[in-house]
Amino acid sequence: MTLTIIYGCSLLALVAALFFSFLVRGVAVDSGDATETARLKEISGAIREGAMAFLGREYTYVGIFALVFAGVIWVALPTSGDGAVNEGFYSAVAFLIGALTSSVCAFLGMQIATLGNVRTTIRAKTSIGAAFRVAFNSGAVMGFGLVGLALLSLTSVYLWFASFISDPHVLMELVAGFGLGGSTVALFGRVGGGIYTKAADVGADLVGKVEQGIPEDDPRNPAVIADNVGDNVGDVAGMGADLFGSCAEGTCAALLIGATSLTLTATTASLLYPILITAVGIPVCLITTFFAKVDDTTVTVEPVLKRQLLLSTVLMSVAIYFVTLKALPAEFQIDGKTITNYGVLYSVLSGLWAGLLVGYVTEYFTSHAYAPVREVADASNTGPATNIIYGLALGYKSAFIPVIAIAITTFISFSFAGMYGIAVAAIGMISTIAIGLTIDAYGPVSDNAGGIAEMSHLGPEIRKRTDMLDAAGNTTAAIGKGFAIGSAVLTAIALFAAFLTRSNIHQLNLLSPVVFAGLLIGGVLPFLFTAQTMKAVGKAAFSMIEEVRRQFRSIPGLLEGTARPDYRTCVSISTKAALREMVMPGVLVIGTPLLVGTLFGTEAVAGVLAGSLVSGLVMALASSNAGGAWDNAKKYIETGQHGGKGSPAHKAAVVGDTVGDPFKDTSGPSLNILMKLMAILSLVFAPYFVQSGGILLKWLGM
């Protein structure tokens, strides 16, 4: 019955994604004017071509790396205790399946986003409600398609391995390779996509808007196509891969911890309860989509999307009550602690509602409807320096409440259900991932729709409607990043617990030189990672700025609008830069736990993981929220405040937004994956670390 429910919900998600896809594709790309229609098709085709070309090249390199790394896993991991199962081989297979599933999800989201953008523009000629529905349906394809594929793949891997592995704990250790595969792809998707989009965005803004004084998304700007391509590769493919990783890793951690309980392993329902949480979220999110309605009387779209989050959270709270009491026994034990099904329920609910709180706090600090962002806008009156100072202060301050919320969630879930409680709390936070991804992917589709309208010269009325959609998308994107960061931390804590379990570490002595040194190294890693990704954006943006300036200088009639810019060269610059610059951050994240574990052993790795969690959480929240605040401070001024577009305050805000772009779209979100990937990597390689025993420590006689 349990497997029937899981597979049924997976298929429901895929059918829903297919249905929403048909709705999007059913909108004809025909504006009623042949010349205008041809222009729309040309622009959207260029965006689609650039996005798919980048994704194809990026995932070719990622695929080669995945095959090589799968070989490393196969060789490094030993056989199981009785020698019956080659853990390295099956972990490598699970790793490749996870990597492949994550890649397919990225291509799925990119396909529909690049189809939905121009159709949203077409519908904006009719009404705001019709345009909203196309953008929302486009996001729903990504949301439901990703969750359906994730559940289907993970459950199938479990069933395959269960057909010849009788020990549930060994089985779940192998399944953890699936989460590692998803997270590895997410790292390169997030970092590469973030570098691509911000290189184009910074180049387009600094030269086009600041130096030349032309509007955003003006077709005269050579970087405008690359900028629109970047919205898709960063916020659709990158975010999708990120949340796929959270879903897969959190579930694998909970499965592994749960497999240590003889009571939970006695029935399929109790063993697979972590998968059931996500499965039940699918019909809940599908019901929620029926309440996403916008009409021509709507003043702002943002509350409609926020209600989706609230409604899905309320419905999920009711659904998970019945699922938990039905699937889990009244009492069971894990690591000597007696846990009740109600304790697990409270843990899931704490994660679920903490996620909503983090989302709302993120909105407060990043939406220009509230005081913090307006203070940043006010600071723009005295120049870029004060704008940046206020933005940084806002980012640091905004991290406080989410950290407290996550700390309380960790305390509650651990008190009620131990490490298993923390793991299911992480899954609870993203149990409504289908609707979360829907409204997140809605944002870049709406943003692209506005760009296409501007480049096609459709007129101010159409752009006004797309701007209304885009304004809501900016806020929901910030909320989505808050969700992603919160779930990443809880997932990483759960993986950390699973790593300790697999490494037979029952207590950590913080005063131990090895552990304390690991804490210090882990604490500095997020800063080094941020420095690498920020500098990567700067280097890529420098090349883009030089190219845009060159075209304005050397192409006669470009600024006057009588000549066409060379979009392809700018797309090529972003593509090459992203592929080149994503390597070193990847080496840092993957290489650190492997090096530390090999040389210094499992306790040193535990210290590194703990240190990176603490500083990574604060750094990720501060970076993402500061960047979102700078962006919306600029947009607030563009509504006519402080002199409006072209004023000194606006120019200062554009500089602040340009600084904030890599914060919110590259470094901040990528830190999620640093925390998760290091933890899942350590979990999978734990037997190798135990076997090596710390080569350098042995040599030193410690």
Image (cartoon, helix red, strand yellow):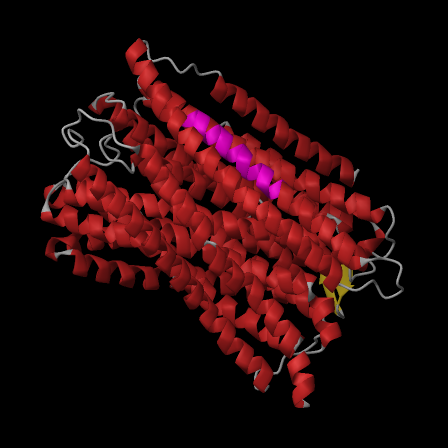
Tell me residue 311's x, y (percent): 49, 38
Assign the magenta stretch its main secondary structure.
helix
Residue furthest out toward the front = 554
> Looking at the image, can residue 509 be seen?
yes
Placement of 451 over or under 42, stated as above or below: below
Rendering coords of residue 309 (x, y %): 47, 41
x then y, percent, for residue 423: 63, 58
Residue 346 visible within the image:
no
Q: Position of residue 639 (x, y in %)?
A: 18, 38
Q: Against 131, is 409 above or below?
A: below
| Residue at image point 34% right, 51% down | 540
Is residue 115 found inside the magenta-colored segment of the image?
yes
Left or right of 535: which side holds 262?
right
Q: Nearer the viewer, residue 269 or 171?
A: 171
Magenta segment: 101-117
Instruction: Note whether 117 is above or below 406 in the view shown.
Output: above
